[in-house]
Image: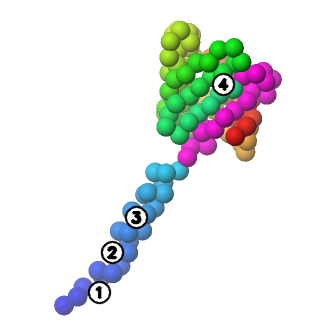
Amino acid sequence: MKNKWTPFIVFTLFLLIVLGAIACRSTPPIVGYWQDVEQKNQYLEFSKDGRVIFDDGKNIITGTYELIGDNYIKVKFEGLGGAFFSLFGADTWKYQIAGDTMTLQVGGESATLKRVR
């Protein structure tokens, strides 16, 4: 005898799996290539795989980032640049994104960036 709930249970499990897969694939809004509005030669790039690149036109500093809560990221740059950020406690950033504009607060300073791509 077939259980009348079997099709419902199978459909519900399938739906949960699909929704879970979609949720895991969603891209954080911070991912992208951002240009500083005032310092037009400065760029930040956040990749989907957790890498970050800072480029000021003269120096390129690479590292990693991790989302650590609502609108906060922990950034770890490599080399001397990373040591500098850590030394001054500027390795936790607060960000806010509205459309293609991001406001960053880093070590008591604020910057506005526009998404380039």
Question: Which one is in front, 15 or 56?
Answer: 56
Region of the chain picked out in magenta, as a range: 27-42
Calculate the distance from the C-alpha at mark 3 to the C-alpha at mark 1. Answer: 20 Å
Q: Examine the image and state in which quarter residue 81 appears.
A: top right
Calculate the distance from the C-alpha at mark 4 to the C-alpha at mark 1. Answer: 56 Å
The local crowd at label 4, few if under 14, some if 14 to 19, many if 20 or more residues have their Cα within 10 Å, is: some
The residue indicated by pointer 3 is 16
Q: Is residue 100 left or right of residue 16?
A: right
**Which residue is outermost to the left?**
1
4 or 2: tag closer to the N-terminus: 2
Task: Reply yes or no: does residue 34 show up in magenta.
Answer: yes
Q: Is residue 24 left or right of residue 73?
A: left
Residue at 55 percent across and 46 percent down: it is 27
3 or 1: tag closer to the N-terminus: 1
Per the image, label 4 sits on a secondary structure element best described as strand
The local crowd at label 1, few if under 14, some if 14 to 19, many if 20 or more residues have their Cα within 10 Å, is: few
How far across and how far down the image is residue 64, in percent? 50, 27
The residue indicated by pointer 4 is 105
Looking at the rendered structure, the kind of residue marked 4 is Gln
Question: Taking 92 as reference, is 8 above or below it?
Answer: below
Calculate the distance from the C-alpha at mark 2 to the C-alpha at mark 1. Answer: 11 Å
Residue at 53 percent across and 9 percent down: it is 80
Residue at 42 percent across and 68 percent down: it is 15
The residue indicated by pointer 1 is 4
Calculate the distance from the C-alpha at mark 4 to the C-alpha at mark 2. Answer: 47 Å
Q: Is residue 7 left or right of residue 55?
A: left
Looking at the rendered structure, the kind of residue marked 3 is Leu
